[in-house]
Amino acid sequence: QVQLVESGGGLVQPGGSLRLSCAASGSFVSINAMGWYRQAPGKQRELVATITSGGTTNYADSVTGRFTISSDNAKNTVSLQMNSLKPEDTAVYYCNGDVRRSWWNPVESTWGQGTQVTVSS
């Protein structure tokens, strides 16, 4: 079984910074890509940022220039540095990984349990 465990959420004032981290553990042979998604109350889950195993990144327009995603393939971790946070960034942030558990299994989208980020004065 593969687990993604997030950490680093919390309460921050507008304009502040937070760093989220996610670590994959369990039995798998590869992770093709990892990313962060978020879901605010009453809204659908949306993409924040993704990064492939080759280092190609993709960001939502709303976070471009403020958030930076990075990964450590050797440690199977992904991080999200969030700067200049706004109240509209308040949401539960979920880590996602495209994980292959064995070479004869297909790639499966795997989710963490989520971590709350609240931006408020």
Image: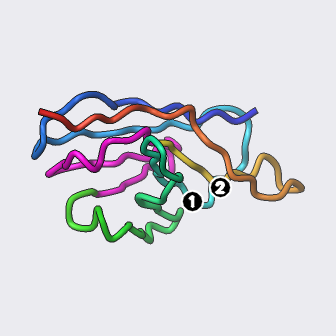
Secondary element type, mark 1: strand
- In reply to whether residue 87 is colored magenta, the answer given is yes
List x then y, in percent, for residue 95: 51, 44
List x then y, in percent, for residue 38: 45, 48
- In reply to whether residue 51 is colored magenta, the answer given is no
In the picture, measured across the screen, residue 58 lies left or right of residue 61, that is right
Residue in the image at 37% along x and 46% along y: 79
Badge number at residue 89: none
Looking at the picture, tell me which residue is in the foreground, 88 or 102.
Answer: 88
Residue in the image at 44% along x and 41% along y: 41
Quadrant including the N terminus: top right
Residue in the image at 57% along x and 37% along y: 112
Q: Which residues are magenta?
A: 68-93
Cβ atoms under marks 2 and 1 closer than 8 Å: yes
Looking at the picture, tell me which residue is in the foreground, 34 or 83.
Answer: 83
The residue indicated by pointer 2 is 98
Nearer-N-terminus badge (2/1): 1
Cα–Cα gap, marks 2 and 1: 5 Å
The residue indicated by pointer 1 is 33
Which of the 4 image quadrants contains residue 4?
top right
Quadrant including the C terminus: top left
Kindly identify the amino acid type of the residue bearing the numbered disc 2: Asp
In the picture, measured across the screen, residue 79 lies left or right of residue 106, that is left
Sort mark 2 into few (<14), some (14-19) or many (20+) by Cα contacts within 10 Å: some
Secondary element type, mark 2: strand
Kindly identify the amino acid type of the residue bearing the numbered disc 1: Ala
